[in-house]
Image (cartoon, rainbow, N blue to C red):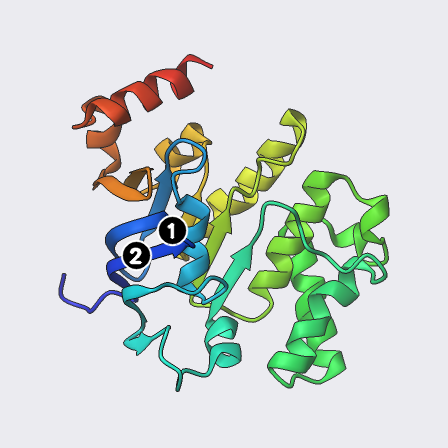
Amino acid sequence: MTNPPIIALEKVSKSYGTSPVLRDCSLTVARGEVVVICGPSGSGKSTLIKCINALEPYQSGSIRFDGVEVGAKSTNLPKLRTRIGMVFQHFELYPHMSALDNIMLAQVHALGRSRSDAKTRAEALLARVGLADKADAFPLNLSGGQQQRVAIARALALDPEVMLFDEPTSALDPEMISDVLDVMVALATGGMTMLVVTHEMGFARRVADRIVFMDHGEIVEDTPKAAFFTAPKTKRAQEFLGKILAH
């Protein structure tokens, strides 16, 4: 790898009390790479990506984002988080604000954009995620899939260098999933660096460069997509794939 990775985790461990959640996790992500993280429930996937933008603290190891140690006391976390977009399982939109205002808010407060510039950017992003006609709608009046697309637009509004997705389709009805995945595929094919926790193996096959398989807080496999789907190295990954692909 000629350029240094934009994300580098080295031997990251985390526990809740005496229960280990992450054990010696090491991982790098290059600019422009799409990495899918999969594994059974409770394997530490969501915790791992939340540690990357310090939504979760970690006890040992190192996480560097573009050379900056995420866990260092001197790190400016609000500034760091403008560079790392995050999309959650449960949309986390402000219910009392319209779709447009949800997307404008952080631009004005975190980036210091004027309201007119923030509005122009928000309108363009709503169009990009196929919701140009929903600018004035409140979250309550949007379907789950529409809310998630607004959440993606909100994350993109800060012009992040990396997008983190934490099971973005798991709270959605099946017919809404494809609209959200289509937006994510377009992002991936457009060159966005992405780290995606998901069980959507069709999405992984289409756009992932690498698959990271986790179990019991450990990274068990970190392998190119083709190798993972044709010949996973470990029995745990083989069993997981067998179950997922059987559905």
Residue 217 location, x and y as percent?
33, 43
Q: Which mark is residue 54?
A: none
Q: Amino acid at mark 2?
A: Ser
Q: Which residue is mark 1?
A: 18
Q: Residue furthest top?
A: 246
Q: Residue at x 40, y 83 (%)?
A: 73
C-alpha distance separating marks 1 and 2? 12 Å
Expressed as whole percent of the image width and height from the top left, the position of residue 124 reads 67, 63
At 26% from the left edge and 63% from the top edge, which residue is drawn? 8
Front of the two marks 1 and 2: 1
* Residue 194 in sight here: no
Label 2: state its secondary structure. Answer: strand
Density class for disc 1 (Cα within 10 Å; few <14, some 14-19, many ≥20) is few
Q: Is residue 97 left or right of residue 11?
A: right
Quarter of the image that includes the N terminus: bottom left
The residue nearer to you, when weighing 55 against 8, is: 55
Of the two numbered discs 1 and 2 on the same chain, state the one appearing first in sequence. Answer: 2
Picture quadrant where residue 115 is located: bottom right
Residue 11: in sight, yes or no? Answer: yes
Relative vertical location of residue 191 with respect to residue 64 in this rendering, above or below = above
Q: Amino acid at mark 1?
A: Thr
Say which residue appears at 65% left-offset and 55% top-offset.
151
